[in-house]
Amino acid sequence: MHELVLIVDFGSQYTQLIARRIREENVYCEIISPELSIEEIKAKKPRAIILSGGPNSIFEKDAPQISSQLFDLAIPILGICYGLQLIARHFGGEVEADQSKEYGRQSIQFKNKSQIFSNVNSGSLVWMSHGDHVSKVPKTFLKLAVSNDGLIAGIAHQAKPIFGVQFHPEVNHTEDGQIIISNFLFKIASFSRDWTPASFVDEEIISIRNKVGKENVILGLSGGVDSSVLAFLLHRAIGEQLFPIFINNGLLRKNEVDEVLKFFEKSHINVIQRDYSKEFLTALAGVSEPEQKRKIIGRIFIEAFETEAKKIKNPGFLAQGTLYPDVIESGAIGKYSVTIKSHHNVGGLPEKMSLKILEPFRGLFKDEVRKVGKILNVPDIMIKRHPFPGPGLAVRCLGEILPERLDILRNVDQVFIAYLKKTGWYDKIWQAFAIILPLQTVGVKGDQRSYENVIALRAVHSSDGMTADWVRIPPEMLAEISTQIINKVPGVNRVVYDITSKPPGTIEWE
């Protein structure tokens, strides 16, 4: 079992970033709900605990709380923003509401030395985002730092390894944030960096074998990075007990079926291909609402796999490439976690299933899956492939899903991606794709009036999909891409480029 950091999520938009920063230090962490009992927390045997920020005021009637017994566990604790305020109030300090607010960058000055701020210079810039603030430090604590507005920015217990900061060390805007997190993990909590892709592979192979036994596993293979790397992991763990099934849901990219089958044939993994496009498209007919699309796709997906399972001897498990961001964005951590969107493999599954779910990557981020793929010798052509959503083109075909609209989208996507690969930009980008909008606009083609579809292009930089920034593709390249799309794809007369980051937007449009 790996050394563990537990992150108690009070609903901060940055909680997943705390997890990312910890994983980057080769330390394993999990995000938990404050509703977890102290007995459940003890059972996980954490080496350290981090209390996240949150949108609530500590004075609100239903503001999330934490068991006071948490502070008696004799392990290091770090409170961030709201977490700091919980610590201060528990130990008899004072928190003041709504008098002084700080948003954005501030500099901090140190009042006392502490390992938590080792190698951080006075005047370092940090990211503040709070209304309430600690106005009086508890008697058993030291004031470590203040902001340039004079507000308390850091505290430490004089006898216990309990710390609090008013700012967010996990965001990029805090210039020494990673140093502070590293100090907490290694100088204070003495972690040993035992969380690596190689150790994950070794442990998961044993875990999968023990869990599966003599039963067979059906893998929902999409041809994307997650399910493909999972196929390699499962094949190494259970060999011929794995039955990868590639379902054509009618929502795939152009030539997707042939390309995926050829890849796995070269990798000596036998794939069963089944065409359920009619079932998916019939069920989606007339549906425009994004969440309804996802639910329908999840239902048909399971129905298809249960049908195929009956053709396989001794089926016991359905394996999926569910990732940690899928779980987080679906609000599955707890009631204080914000639900951004359901994922077909998290929120879209029916309650009753004849197959047990196997999700080895449920605790991993996308970049960690790619590292696991490297350990498993998955070819770069697959590892470097851009992410593709489980619901496929359904969430890139805004409005009603019609065969002719899907065909336009497939052709546009092919032109866009081919151009990026030709120019060497594909490997510079984390994810790029096209969206067909539910509207048409007036244009001029061949000296005649046209009334055709609008296409939006999206390209983002990211490491895990939890946050993203739009890619600054040069204007002359965008002009060339637009020209190629309009000239090569009938039915399109306007191309726009999305310059929205995440947050506030999501990467996919639905």
Image (cartoon, helix red, strand yellow):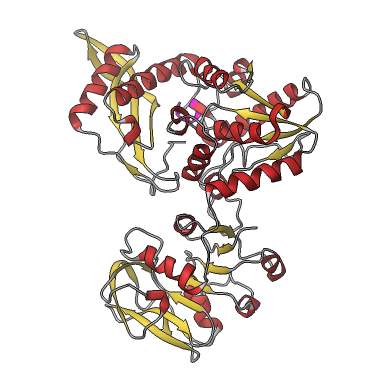
Residue 394 is a magenta residue? yes
Residue 201 is a magenta residue? no
Which residue is depicted at the point 47% across and 21% down?
253
As displayed, is residue 136 above or below residue 490? below
- Image coordinates of residue 66 in percent, x first then y, are 61, 72
Residue 298 visible (yes or no):
yes
As displayed, is residue 173 above or below residue 379? below
- Image coordinates of residue 94 in percent, x first then y, are 47, 85
Of residues 205 and 182, the one nearer the viewer is: 205
Residue 81 visible (yes or no):
no
Which residue is depicted at the point 55% across and 34% down?
229
- Please report the bounds of the magenta region as a residue range: 393-398
- Image coordinates of residue 285 in percent, x first then y, are 57, 21
Which residue is depicted at the point 40% across and 66% down?
168
- Asked which quadrant contains residue 278, the reply is top right
Of residues 246 and 327, the one nearer the viewer is: 246
Of residues 144 and 185, the one nearer the viewer is: 185
- Image coordinates of residue 177 in percent, x first then y, are 37, 65
